Image (cartoon, rainbow, N blue to C red):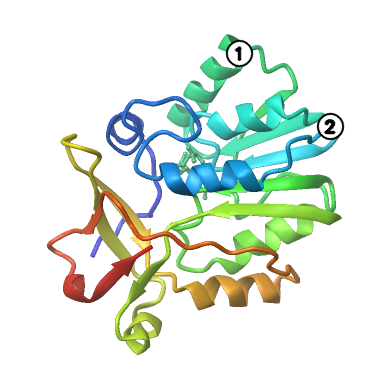
């Protein structure tokens, strides 16, 4: 079991993440999670004209670019990794994303006013929290009453389900591999689907749509004691 803070992206991990998981792609749908992201692309409204959008754990800003291109009046891209924000900043310059604001911060404490955002997008950044309540609570706080949250995530569940609940919140090392590319170890927290549903409900968010995919290119690392029982979605 990995003991360090999950979801820390320093320069080495950032480079490997984009080489392995994303296969070097800077498009929003490249890499092992292409099917999930394709689905997200379809779910997002085509026009975000005049709306305020927030891209949480923005990484290199691929989704900020989509939100910007769909007409959002302002896009706030937040990440706690300096290296990720440097990539997002390059994208902002290259594509002239003049309504994009880059912010360094922790999504568990959003530096934003209540009810100030219409669209929140969280793409593969919610798998790092042993307790999801502070982050989802913050999202619910900053969302306008008619706002929407779009999430893409890895659900890490253990069979039998009772074991999932026993191990909930523990970090599991997961190996990601795209084609023959070298493996990168991702540190995800065991979060059953029911946990997301509970946390959303507690925060006052209702679920409009839910789609689940079988995992591709992901295996649980050998040193995880529950390896044979783990299911990734
Ligand atoms: C797997 S990357 C996904 C990047 C991007 N959303 C995408 O889909 O391409 C996860 C990102 O979440 C960020 N992150 C993790 N924990 C965070 C936190 N507590 N606050 C802000 N950003 C965080 C990481 O720095 C990293 O950029």
The residue at the point 39 percent across, 26 percent down is 25
Quadrant of the drawing holding the C terminus? bottom left
Residue 115: x, y in percent? 85, 52
The residue at the point 26 percent across, 56 percent down is 174
Distance (Cα) linking label 1 and label 2: 18 Å
Q: Which residue is mark 1?
A: 95
Q: Secondary structure at mark 2?
A: loop
Q: Residue 194, can we see it? A: yes
Quick one: 173 or 32, which is closer to the camera?
32
The residue at the point 84 percent across, 32 percent down is 49
Q: Secondary structure at mark 1?
A: loop
The answer to whether 219 appears left or right of 233 in the picture is left
Instruction: Locate residue 222: give its quadrant.
Output: bottom left
The answer to whether 5 appears left or right of 102 in the picture is left
Q: Which residue is mark 2?
A: 49
- Of labels 1 and 2, earlier in sequence is 2
Q: Using the image, tell me which numbered label, if any, was put on residue 31.
A: none
Instruction: Locate residue 171: give its quadrant.
Output: bottom left
Residue 212: x, y in percent? 47, 63
Is there CB contact under 8 Å for labels 1 and 2?
Answer: no
Residue 42: x, y in percent? 62, 44
Instruction: Point out the frontmost of discs 1 and 2.
Output: 2
Quick one: 114 or 183, which is closer to the camera?
183
Quick one: 207 or 190, which is closer to the camera?
207
């Amino acid at each position: 079991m990995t003991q360090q803070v999950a979801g820390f992206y320093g320069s080495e991990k950032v480079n490997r993440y984009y080489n392995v998981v994303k296969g070097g792609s800077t498009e929003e749908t490249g890499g092992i999670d292409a099917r999930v992201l394709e689905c997200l692309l379809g779910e997002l409204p085509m026009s975000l004209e005049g709306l305020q959008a927030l891209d949480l754990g923005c990484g290199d800003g691929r989704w900020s670019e989509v939100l910007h291109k769909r007409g959002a009046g302002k896009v706030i891209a937040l990440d706690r990794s300096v290296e990720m924000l440097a990539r997002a900043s390059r994208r902002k310059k290259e594509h002239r994303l003049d309504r994009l604001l880059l912010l360094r911060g922790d999504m568990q404490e959003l530096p934003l006013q209540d009810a100030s955002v219409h669209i929140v997008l969280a793409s593969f950044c919610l798998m790092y929290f042993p307790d999801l309540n502070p982050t989802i609570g913050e999202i619910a706080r900053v969302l306008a009453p008619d706002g929407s949250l779009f999430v893409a995530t890895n659900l890490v569940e253990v069979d039998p389900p009772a074991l999932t609940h026993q191990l909930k919140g523990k970090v599991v090392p997961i190996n990601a591999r795209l084609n023959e590319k070298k493996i990168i170890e991702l540190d995800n927290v065991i979060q059953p689907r029911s946990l997301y549903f509970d946390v959303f409900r507690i925060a006052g968010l209702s679920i409009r749509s839910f789609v689940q995919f079988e995992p591709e290119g992901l295996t649980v690392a050998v040193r995880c004691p529950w390896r044979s029982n783990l299911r990734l979605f």
